[in-house]
Image (spheres, helix red, strand yellow):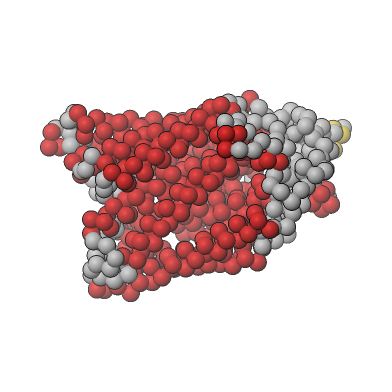
């Protein structure tokens, strides 16, 4: 039996193929139209602009930290200023950039299109989530302006309970940001359940959707725990209620339990979207169906659920019973299995694939390499005897960044390069994109691999000064940070030039079988003129000819499927 798909006809004409900005950017002009928009694409672009601004601020502070550590003693700032700078680097990067980056920007833009929907389930709630994000960010910035927060991004008690009251501004900012995460998660879950196009069953969902869906589950279930924890800390500081400060009868270890019960699942809020993007890149640039589709999909769900069980491995040195630490250690090894499933299935997909090393694929391959290093080094930290030596050293800093930057940031950059033509209607210079990737990949490894050696030799993290024997490795790490910064600068210039004078993007420049590439470029303001009907999976390259892939075929939203 052969079924034909219904869809949006191609919007050929001046609006669809002009050299100006995309029609969903220009069909209503003015700041007011942006501030009141319910278009998920515009909201995604506003998230993108906001998180790039946050990334710039966090990145500048990272360079300041590495500059200070170029030499022993004071280089450019004193110890108090150093503590404030690395605190703000961590808080901005985690709460304003990494957590909202892929779900807020790329998820908002592409999740409805991939589902064949005209928008998310609750468009007004979607806009409200963005405003809540901005409101929380303002609180964080006020915390920077009115005082000095030097607690680290974890706000550990009892120090944070006794520190300057600007901590209240920071914690309230994170508290507010949590509502944005929760509401976005609820919106995405409702959209996936209720707005899938006809013919799109759970086995035809793009793996990007599976990853965002699993992330949304974690956001809804885990974020309230952090919100309550920070609210209790604020009440303790403002009202003197004994919760965490031992001087008035509180328990600081309780804060760690609460904080990491959220923050370890939050690691998967950060990494699952990056994995979700890599699925799309691996499928497109190897021209193969993702090997073990359902295993990859279910591994996202498994990570979301198992992530709630392993928070105690951050606390092996906090005085827990030996039996508790043994259980958490075993669960830590268990949670590595779903991640391993993804990596092995990606490699199996690449095997004998028709691989194209376009810049998005370079970020995907970089993700696999760096995330694997991050995952393997995590097993060292999950081993009780080894963790005693490595706890609170630079080994932990390197592991964290290989997972978060090598994972989430590389996934975000890969997705940004991949979907840039669809979002803007413009192509970027592929040669400069590869130069930027080389600088970023090289700079990242020079910066953080040297920190594995620093940590294994006993260099503690968060220290303003260090012994002479660590000097060469700190110099190496700081040099890598400068290379990394140059790579991001090249990338920024490349994207700006693309917007100003880039070539017009074709309908499907990568020849992807993904649903989002079979709409017009740029997408129609309502995504489709008619309701699409799905008749094949998003990675069924064997059902499409190369001509069909690159031309887009709008009149058939998806290719016909013979059964």
Q: How many marks?
A: 0
Q: Residue at x 46, y 54 (%)?
A: 56
Q: Residue furthest right?
A: 1
Task: Identify which residue, 148 or 347, lies in the foreground.
Answer: 148
Expressed as whole percent of the image width and height from the top left, the position of residue 440 reads: 51, 63
Residue 111 in sight? no
Q: Residue at x 76, y 38 (%)?
A: 536
Taking 399 as reference, is 243 left or right? left
Residue 17 in sight? yes
Taking 495 as reference, is 307 left or right? left
Q: Residue furthest front?
A: 30
Expressed as whole percent of the image width and height from the top left, the position of residue 79 reads: 23, 59
Where is the C terminus found, in terms of image quarters?
top right
Q: Quadrant of residue 178?
A: top left
Q: Residue at x 41, y 43 (%)?
A: 95
Expressed as whole percent of the image width and height from the top left, the position of residue 521 reads: 74, 45
Task: Identify which residue, 56 or 181, lies in the foreground.
Answer: 56
Q: Residue furthest left?
A: 247
Where is the N terminus found, in terms of image quarters?
top right
Expressed as whole percent of the image width and height from the top left, the position of residue 329 reads: 35, 46
Task: Identify which residue, 451 or 40, lies in the foreground.
Answer: 40
Q: Residue at x 57, y 38 (%)?
A: 31
Task: Identify which residue, 319 or 111, lies in the foreground.
Answer: 111
Q: Quadrant of residue 293?
A: top right
């Amino acid at each position: 039996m052969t079924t034909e798909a219904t869809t949006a006809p191609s919007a050929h004409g001046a609006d669809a193929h002009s050299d100006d900005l995309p029609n969903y950017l220009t069909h209503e002009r003015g700041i007011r139209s942006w501030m009141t928009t319910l278009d998920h694409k515009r909201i995604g672009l506003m998230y993108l602009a906001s998180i790039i601004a946050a990334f710039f601020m966090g990145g500048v502070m990272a360079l300041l930290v590495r500059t200070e550590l170029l030499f022993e003693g004071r280089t450019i700032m004193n110890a108090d200023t150093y503590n404030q700078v690395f605190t703000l680097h961590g808080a901005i990067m985690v709460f304003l950039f990494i957590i909202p980056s892929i779900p807020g920007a790329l998820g908002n833009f592409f999740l409805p299109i991939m589902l064949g929907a005209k928008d998310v389930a609750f468009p007004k709630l979607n806009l409200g989530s963005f405003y809540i994000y901005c409101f929380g960010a303002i609180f964080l910035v006020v915390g920077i302006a009115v005082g000095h927060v030097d607690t680290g991004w974890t706000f550990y008690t009892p120090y944070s309970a006794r520190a300057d009251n600007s901590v209240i501004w920071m914690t309230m900012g994170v508290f507010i940001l949590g509502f944005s995460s929760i509401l976005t998660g609820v919106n995405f879950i409702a959209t996936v359940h209720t707005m899938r196009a006809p013919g799109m069953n759970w086995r035809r969902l793009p793996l990007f959707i599976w990853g965002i869906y699993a992330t949304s589950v974690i956001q809804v279930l885990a974020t309230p725990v952090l919100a309550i924890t920070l609210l209790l800390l604020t009440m303790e500081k403002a009202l003197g209620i004994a919760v965490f400060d031992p001087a008035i009868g509180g328990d600081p270890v309780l804060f760690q339990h609460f904080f990491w019960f959220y923050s370890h699942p939050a690691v998967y809020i950060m990494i699952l979207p990056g994995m979700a993007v890599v699925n799309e890149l691996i499928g497109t640039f190897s021209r193969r169906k993702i090997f073990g589709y359902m295993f990859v999909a279910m591994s996202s769900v498994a990570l979301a659920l198992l992530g709630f069980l392993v928070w105690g491995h951050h606390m092996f040195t906090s005085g827990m019973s030996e039996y508790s630490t043994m259980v958490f250690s075993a669960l830590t090894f268990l949670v590595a299995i779903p991640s391993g499933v993804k990596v092995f299935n990606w490699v199996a997909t690449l095997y004998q694939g028709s691989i194209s090393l376009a810049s998005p694929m370079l970020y995907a391959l970089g993700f696999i390499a760096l995330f694997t290093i991050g995952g393997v080094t995590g097993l060292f930290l999950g081993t009780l005897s080894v963790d005693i030596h490595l706890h609170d050293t630079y080994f932990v800093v390197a592991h964290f960044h290989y997972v978060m930057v090598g994972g989430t940031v590389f996934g975000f950059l890969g997705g940004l390069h991949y979907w840039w033509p669809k979002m803007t209607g413009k192509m970027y210079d592929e040669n400069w994109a590869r130069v930027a990737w080389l600088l970023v990949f090289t700079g990242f490894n020079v910066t953080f691999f040297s920190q594995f050696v620093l940590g294994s030799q006993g260099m503690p993290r968060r220290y303003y000064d260090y012994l002479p024997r660590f000097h060469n490795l700190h110099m190496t790490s700081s040099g890598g940070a400068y290379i990394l910064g140059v790579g991001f600068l090249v990338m920024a210039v490349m994207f700006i030039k693309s917007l100003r004078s880039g070539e017009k993007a074709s309908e499907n420049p990568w020849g992807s079988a993904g649903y989002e590439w079979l709409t017009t470029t740029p997408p129609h303001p309502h995504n489709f003129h008619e309701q699409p009907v799905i008749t094949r999976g998003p990675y069924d390259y064997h059902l499409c000819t190369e001509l069909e892939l690159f031309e887009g075929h709008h009149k058939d939203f998806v290719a016909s499927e013979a059964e």
